Image: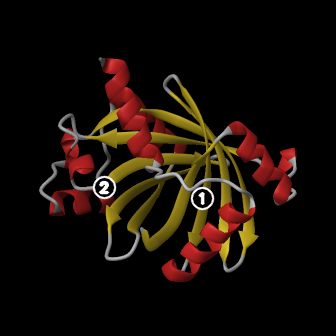
Amino acid sequence: MSQEIEIEFKNLLTQEEFLKIRDFFNIKEHEFFFQENHYFDTPQFSLKELGSALRIRKKQDKYCLTLKEPAAIGLLETHQFITEEVANEMIHSGQLIEGQIAERLNGHDIDYKTITYFGTLSTTRAEKEYKNGLIVLDHSQYLSVEDYELEYEVQDENEGKVFFSDLLDELNIPIRHTKNKIRRFYEQKYKEMG
């Protein structure tokens, strides 16, 4: 198990803005890689109610179970690396395995045995170092939605906010209130469920 604090800024983009940023950072097609996020919660959305999220991310044939929880600044991410077999079993059965993340859920009075699988969000992603942080350019597909997003991952929240705002201003891209991927996924799921 490993833990880290994630501080990031996000902005949804149009396809045209996505291409503008790709060109601005001189990102080539071969620099994009594919990853999948498989989302889990209880049937009552207990994690969502806590402002938390649980996912398995498949990236370059590696699988990581991650619990994201609110922190004083950013999000506390707890990572548990798992095998492909365990990941597939969790996705197909909908059941969470025992381990450090199950223990953290139990600490929030969430029985890990009530966790269920909700769906997958696929992303084509490119990353570039930029002013003490990491620019992340995402093209995601989930349910009936396709969207484009810019993320900026930083260590210093105040500095990152200035750099991110300046970048959007320089590229003439409006700042848009942007929910994280799992929230967008769940909101779309609600919509499609009627």
Residue at (38% x, 44% y) in the render: 183
| Amino acid type, mark 1 | Glu
Residue 49 point in image, percent of width and height: 21, 49
Secondary structure beneath label 2: loop
Q: Is residue 118 visible?
A: no
Residue 54 point in image, percent of width and height: 36, 50
Mark closer to the observer (2, 1): 1
First-in-chain label (2 vs 1): 2
**Residue 36 is drawn in which quadrant?**
top right
Residue at (43% x, 40% y) in the render: 184
| Amino acid type, mark 2 | Ser
> In the rendered view, does 86 fall on the left or right side of 40?
right
Near-viewer residue (104 or 6): 6
Secondary structure beneath label 1: strand
Residue lying at the far left in this picture: please name it: 109
Sort mark 1 into few (<14), some (14-19) or many (20+) by Cα contacts within 10 Å: some
| Alpha-carbon span between mark 2 and mark 1 | 19 Å
Above or below: residue 194 compared with residue 22: above
Q: Where is the C terminus found, in terms of image quarters?
A: top left
Residue 19 point in image, percent of width and height: 78, 44
> In the rendered view, does 115 fall on the left or right side of 12?
left
> In the rendered view, does 36 fall on the left or right side of 82?
right
Q: Which mark is residue 71?
A: none
Residue at (67% x, 80% y) in the render: 132
Q: Is residue 41 visible?
A: yes
- Which residue lies under the disc numbered 2? 52
> In the rendered view, does 128 fall on the left or right side of 159?
right
- Which residue lies under the disc numbered 1? 151
Check whether the beta carbons of the residues at disc 2 and disc 1 lie within 8 A of each other: no
